Amino acid sequence: EAEVAQSPRYKITEKSQAVAFWCDPISGHATLYWYRQILGQGPELLVQFQDESVVDDSQLPKDRFSAERLKGVDSTLKIQPAELGDSAMYLCASSNGQGHEKLFFGSGTQLSVL
Amino acid sequence: AQTVTQSQPEMSVQEAETVTLSCTYDTSESDYYLFWYKQPPSRQMILVIRQEAYKQQNATENRFSVNFQKAAKSFSLKISDSQLGDAAMYFCAYRRETSGSRLTFGEGTQLTVNP
């Protein structure tokens, strides 16, 4: 079965540094989601793309977070500057955006901010 | 806004026994989907089971089944013949019927399976 690819798997950074995460969705999936999961909690949506367009970024801290999906395929999520509270798992998911679609999740990027 | 509540932070079950995880949700929509996801220590989200709100019949997937009570906005997961590999964090999730809409997750229930 095709998978959602994410990299890096782990990232350790210092406070105030910039970090970036990459996601490659399943081929043909128009909808891409970035979720943040704090340890012991459920994932929360940060941003949702339909092709290259952002359809929901209401929970994205726009002063420090940015996301792009320039060609409507892979996506990058950036944090600048990183803060201690950003330590979390960042999950990417994709779906074909049609009807009763299933969301496919990647393995995530575990971020630790020191 | 839709909310999903899981009132059991932790549950445990003996191997081969049955356990039920609870979930309630709040929505004003009439059409939606409900899900249970499993997240093992690898942190990979794995879909366990899905329920369409318009279906009265409860979904089943092998040892996993749900008790969907639409009027009560309740959606519990029953795991029969529990196995050691079932140990994981379980998340209940809601999604509107609109194509491409987001998943809203509960806080999760950590399931331990004792040999």
Image: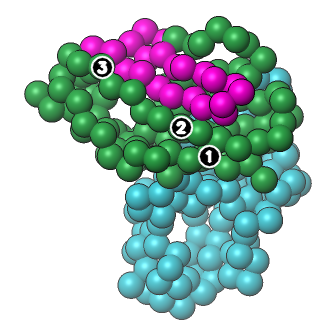
Residue contact at pointers 1 and 2, CB within 8 angstroms: yes
Mark 3: amino acid: Thr
Same chain for labels 1 and 2? Say yes or no.
yes
Nearer the N terminus, badge 2 or badge 3? 3
Relative to B48, does residue A66 appear above or below in the rendering? below
On the image, the x and y values in percent for residue A82 come to 55, 83
Segment colored magenta: B61-81
The secondary structure type at the circle numbered 1 is strand
Mark 2: amino acid: Cys
Figure colour scheme: by chain
Q: Which residue is mark 2?
A: B23
| Res B18 label | 3
Residue drawn at 70 percent across, 11 percent down: B56
Q: CA distance from mark 1 to mark 3?
A: 23 Å
| Res B4 label | 1
Is B80 inside the magenta-drawn segment?
yes
Relative to A54, does residue A87 appear above or below in the rendering? below
The prevailing secondary structure element of the residues shown in magenta is strand
Nearer the N terminus, badge 1 or badge 2? 1
